[in-house]
Every structure is written in C-alpha cells, then in structure tokens.
Amino acid sequence: MSTHAARHVALAKAQNNASSSPSATLASAASAITAASVASRPKVVPMTIPYLNIKITLDEFCPPAAFAAVMVDFFDEIYPIAPLIHRPTYENALKNRLYDQDPEFLQLCVAMAAFTVTTFPQRLPSYGWGGPELTVAHIVELASVIVRLNRGIDQRRTMVEDPTVAAVVSRMGLSYSCHHSGEFNNGWSHANEAVLMFRELGLYRAEAYKGLSRAGAVISRRMFWVLYIMQM
C-alpha cells in the first residue's frame, strides 16, 4: 500500500472508530494523520496547529501529480458550469504554491479537488491517487477533517465569527462533495456554515461590496445566487 493510501485508510479507520463527540473525532483524525505522515517535501512550509501538534500540507491530502490531474478536470469540466472561484487569481495562487503558506487557500484547494473527484468518481483510479482501498468517501472525509482542523491555524480568519469569501466557497465545495458522495447531513452542515459566513460578511447588501477586490466581488455575487437558490 502506498504512503498516501495508508494515510487515507488510517483516517477512515479513525473516523469510523471515533465517538460521537466532535472533539474525540478530531483527535482521532489528527492522530491518524500524524501517524501516517512520515515524510515532507523539502520546500514546503507546513502549517502547524499548536494545540494538536500536527502539520498539514496539500500532499497530506493528495499526491502532487494526482492533484494536478484533478485540477485539469476541475477547470475543463466543473468550472464552466460552477465557477465558484476567480480563475486567474486561483491559477496564480496555484503557480506560486500559496497553499504551502495560506491555510484558507489550502482549504479551497482541498474543497475544489474533493468536488471534482466526487463529481467524476469513475476517474479516481486514473489519477493515481492511492490504491483500491481509497474511496471517494474517504477523500470527502479527509477533506472535511483538513478544513475543520485548519481552523486551529488562524482562528480569527477561519471561524464563522470572522469569515472570508474564500472560506464561504470552500464550505460550499465541501457541501457539494458530501452530497455527491451520499453524506447528506454533512453536506447540509457545510452549506449552513457557508450561509452563516455569507450573512456575517453582509454580502447580501450592496454596500458590503465596496471594500472587496474586483475578484472578491465577482465571486461574492456568484455565491449569493448559489446560496439563494440553495435555500429556495
């Protein structure tokens, strides 16, 4: 079994064996990721969650070659019908490996990758992502855990009380992923969090857009209609 497959299987076992307590679930998941992570890329600056003493990188979620292949499918197949990101900004951030330094961009990458894989589950083997033990359900579980654990890196910017547009988009990406994989309760949980964040940002009011960048304003308008239709 590959290193990445081992990580995913370990996480899945931890998730299945954890109690219903959210803190116990996260602790088990964190232990699984820590135990399975035995190597790191030399140029990556891992983000540390102090109170859990673990480090998270994009490679913990997906091998680099697989992530590149998934992003090709994302831009070719999903982006034209669900443009949840500002493509030029996103692609530039990918080029500069912003996910190695910015927890919120890491969450966004994880969410978009999970969205893509759950939309085209039949393509998972062609990505070279893990082995036969790895399922789409495992990927969605890991994506959700990474996003939740990342809150501990910068609590001010990633919690519902002080959100960003990127955080809203990542939650909606996870919501779609969970619904595609049959995890409907988790899907609605992520969607509801996205709604709460959007309301906290006040992006249902025209004046709230004055302080946003052009890219942020474009995505916020798109998210308004996504969330509006979702609640109809």
Image: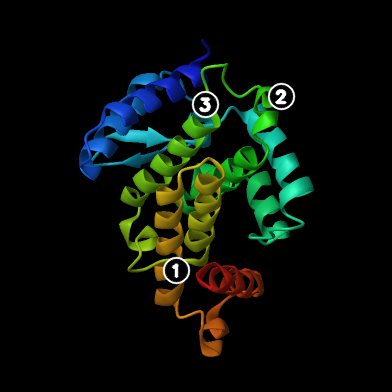
Q: Mark 2 = which residue?
A: 126
Task: Please state which amino acid type lies under the numbered disc 2.
Answer: Ser
* Circle 2 Cα neighbour tier, 10 Å, few/some/many (<14 / 14–19 / ≥20): few
| Residue 168 point in image, percent of width and height | 49, 62
Residue occupying image coordinates x 70% and y 51%? 91
Residue occupying image coordinates x 64% and y 59%? 85
Task: Please state which amino acid type lies under the numbered disc 3.
Answer: Pro
The answer to which of marks 3 and 2 sits earlier in the sequence is 3
| Residue 34 point in image, percent of width and height | 34, 26
Looking at the rendered structure, which numbered label has been put on residue 16?
none
Q: Is residue 3 above or below residue 52?
A: above
Q: Mark 1 = which residue?
A: 195
Q: Are marks 3 and 2 in contact (CB under 8 Å)?
A: no
Q: Mark 3 = which residue?
A: 42
Q: How many marks?
A: 3
Residue occupying image coordinates x 35% and y 23%? 13
The answer to which of marks 1 and 3 sits earlier in the sequence is 3
| Residue 57 point in image, percent of width and height | 47, 36
Closer to us: 218 or 199:
199
- In the visual, does 49 lie left or right of 20? right
Colouring method of the image: rainbow
For mark 3, give the secondary structure.
loop
For mark 2, give the secondary structure.
helix
